[in-house]
Amino acid sequence: MTVNQLQETPLLNPLLDFAGLPRFDAIVPSDVQPAISQLLDHCRALVARLSSDAVAATWADFAAPLGDGFEQLSRAWGIVGHVHSVNDVPAWRDAYNGMLPEVSRFYAEVGQNVKLFAKYKAIAGSAEYAGLSAAQRRVIENELRDFRLSGAELAEDSKPRFQAISEELAQLSAKFSENLLDTTNAFAELVTDEAELAGLPDDARQAAREAAEQEGKSGWKFTLHMPSYLPVMQYADSRRLRAAMYRAYATRAAEFGAVELDNTPLIRRILELRREQAQMLGYANFAEVSLVPKMAESVPQVLCFLRDLAVRARPFAEKDVADLRAFARDQLALATMEPWDIGYVSEKLLQARYAFSEQEVKQYFTEDKVLAGLFSVIESLFGVHLKPDCAPVWHEDVRFFRIETPAGELVGQFYLDLYARPTKRGGAWMDEAIGRRRIRQESLATSSKGIQRPVAYLNCNFSRPIGERDGKARPAIFTHDEVSTLFHETGHGLHHLLTQVDELGVAGIHGVEWDAVELPSQFMENYCWEWRVLEGMTGHIDTGQPLPRALFDKMLAAKNFQSGLQTLRQVEFSLFDLLLHSDYDPAGERSVLELLADVRREVAVLVPPEWHRFPNSFAHIFAGGYGAGYYSYKWAEVLSADCYGAFEDAGNPFDQATGRRFLSEILSVGGSRSAIDSFRAFRGREPQVDALLRHSGMITA
Ligand SMILES: [Zn+2]
């Protein structure tokens, strides 16, 4: 099946219709298996054909048609994944899970295909290469890098071992998560004396009551899941209850419980295997491998970054702790502050200092005002226009918008799905529906001038509108945190939508280094803290009045509460992660806990009890994608704060020249050049940590 044949029969299966926007009005779960199978067959045939010796190793004969063929699969599968996330009903779940193993297998196969690797290498070594566009060269470079890191260059007799390690690592990660979940679920604290609930908010009591009732018990059941655990640690006056919950939480998946659920041996094995794989690839350790596709250049560079941050944050963290101890002693009659008191005392101190109600703030952030405010920030920063648009959608609440140039030319489009639904995945996220690229065959064009315009999904889980006013539905209202989340996801969206890159593989967020990808999103959050923006973006749900300045000042004052402590905590985790994957021998004498103790001696101001088993629940690095990459959170924060600092230097958060430069040097170029080059082009210098420290209240002006 060739690309052209697929195009001739698009109406048979709406998932195979690539002529325009996804056909959410027509696609049904039973379309998934036939469409995806057909696309997989097509892609496999394409791989076989393009990897043959008869096909020249050139961009036009090899890289371009391979990219075109793969795009159809990723677009169709992307639609399936999206619907599964926003409408997780049994039929869609089955349709998605039914094809997931086959799709994963296909991508694993491609990653191991040495013939494809050889073709890319041949292009890189050809006379043509120098004449390719910068974006095309970057696509080739990224392909070569990814093939190398998945072992494509190893000697044939080493490959089975490499593959076996990858598979064992995948199993170990899955087991790590399962153990953590099982031990989290295994614990419950049943409170039977109502007096022990003192301090807890009503909703937390209610939930605990219902949890007990579900098991036919009287009393209140508390668990180690966040919605149950956190309120106890924050609000429960009972020190006994807090201490019991804290100990249970801190010792999950460790040697104190069931031996088959202990993550300790898994940690050692994961570290050994990662190191072995890294050494097979010619690196000293796993941290070096992890950094290859990232913006950070070397392990020493990241260590230096983290240690510098620790030194700067330390005085503020020490003050945070001194304040906590003094408050605990003087106001709460706690002579000593135990680890299970910290959350509780912090909450009481926060209330005493900055008392204002989230509920009160929320009345000012009505949906129409917030969206208008967000759009006007985007329009004035980047010189584009946003307008409502029409498209088939997956739910009646979903809205659709278009971005245009001042001359009315289409730039991109996006869906906005704001409200929580029982069948929608939690959290907020941006995803792409269609990526920007130059269309090679005019017949495939979805718009004028041979450019395929990008389309994004912005998804949140905010409360839907409640009640009526004057016979009309009242608008939805959002917390300030939710507004901030919306700006964050919109930042990712703009990175995808405002790109000017013509090659799909490096357009928008494609190919952007992992530790730099949060730059545009965190950058946009800053605008939620600009008085000028908030003044225009708020209107009380009943009176229409903007947010009072005095309330804003309280929010601003509370924003940096304990930022010193929080920074040191992030540094501690990051430093531990990086040292564990670089300067630590899993086969040696020193234990993982000893390394952690050393890290804490170096940077921490609050040290948990000796029996705390933090590594055993550090799923980010042992079961997620953050191994030797946890530092990325702080790294990207430095970049985004420093970019915003350029606007502060200009004396105006909407400075036009700076906004256009952010657009052209950061957003437009996407992954077509390295993040550090983009940063330098925008800022005219290397990144500096000062803006982040200032924004977090850790530079005294
Ligand atoms: Zn993000």
Image (spheres, helix red, strand yellow):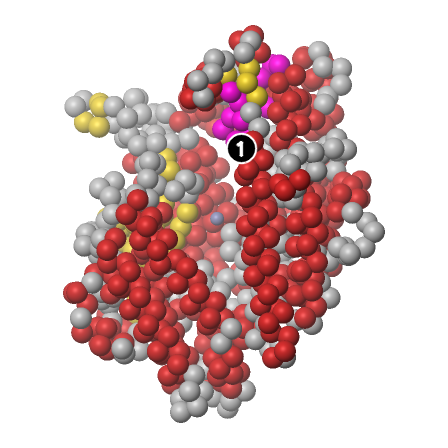
Q: Residue at x 35, y 41 (%)?
A: 424
Q: Position of residue 638 (x, y in %)?
A: 60, 50
Q: Which residues are magenta?
A: 221-238
- Eyeballing the image, is 114 above or below 84? below
- Quick check: is 321 in the magenta stretch? no
- Eyeballing the image, is 109 above or below 351? below
Q: Position of residue 500 (x, y in %)?
A: 39, 66
Q: Residue at x 25, y 47 (%)?
A: 394
Q: Mark 1 = which residue?
A: 185
Dot 1 falls on a residue whose secondary structure is: helix
Residue 210 visible from this viewpoint = yes
| 110 relative to 395 in the view: left or right | right
Residue type at mark 1?
Answer: Asn
- Quick check: is 226 in the magenta stretch? yes
Which quadrant is home to the N terminus?
A: bottom left
Q: Position of residue 204 (x, y in %)?
A: 48, 20
| 85 relative to 387 in the view: left or right | right
- Eyeballing the image, is 522 above or below 233? below
Q: Position of residue 311 (x, y in %)?
A: 75, 43
Q: Nearer the viewer, residue 658 or 449?
A: 449
| 202 relative to 461 in the view: left or right | right
| 492 relative to 637 in the view: left or right | left
Q: Nearer the viewer, residue 618 or 126?
A: 618
Outermost residue toward the right? 589
Q: Residue at x 70, y 52 (%)?
A: 268
Q: Residue at x 56, y 56 (%)?
A: 170
Which quadrant is home to the C terminus?
A: top right
